């Protein structure tokens, strides 16, 4: 079975048990906050 990307699952161990991919975007968020000088940032 191929891994799939699941949208909306928040339980990490459930994603692992169901053979889903996990994409960590923490570094991307850091970059957005560092490079953005707007008064408002909605994520």
Image (spheres, grey):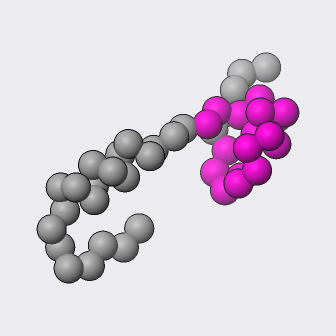
Q: Position of residue 2 (x, y in %)?
A: 72, 21
Query: Against 30, is 27 above or below?
Result: above
Q: Does the magenta portion include 21?
A: yes
- Residue 34 figure quarter: bottom left
- Residue 16 figure quarter: top right
Q: Which residue lies furthest to the bottom in this view?
A: 39
Q: Count of labels shown?
A: 0
Query: The C terminus appears in which quarter of the rendering?
Result: bottom left
Residue at 82% across / 42% down in the picture?
A: 14
Residue 36 falls left or right of residue 9: left
Which is more toward the observer, 9 or 27? Answer: 27
Q: Position of residue 40 (x, y in %)?
A: 26, 79
Q: Does the magenta portion include 40?
A: no
Tell me the magenta residue range: 6-22
Residue at 64% across / 33% down in the picture?
A: 21
Query: Against 17, is 9 above or below?
Result: below
Residue 5 falls left or right of residue 43: right
Which is more toward the observer, 26 or 20? Answer: 26
Query: The N terminus appears in which quarter of the rendering?
Result: top right
Residue 13 falls left or right of residue 34: right
Q: Where is residue 18 in the image (x, y as percent from the top left)?
A: 82, 34
Q: Position of residue 36 (x, y in %)?
A: 19, 62
- Residue 12 figure quarter: top right
Query: Against 32, is 19 above or below?
Result: above
Q: Which residue lies furthest to the top in this view?
A: 1
């Amino acid at each position: 079975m191929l891994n799939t990307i699941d949208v909306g699952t928040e339980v990490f161990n459930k994603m692992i048990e169901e053979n889903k991919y996990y994409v960590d975007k923490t570094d991307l968020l850091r970059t957005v906050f560092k490079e953005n000088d707007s008064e408002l940032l909605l994520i």
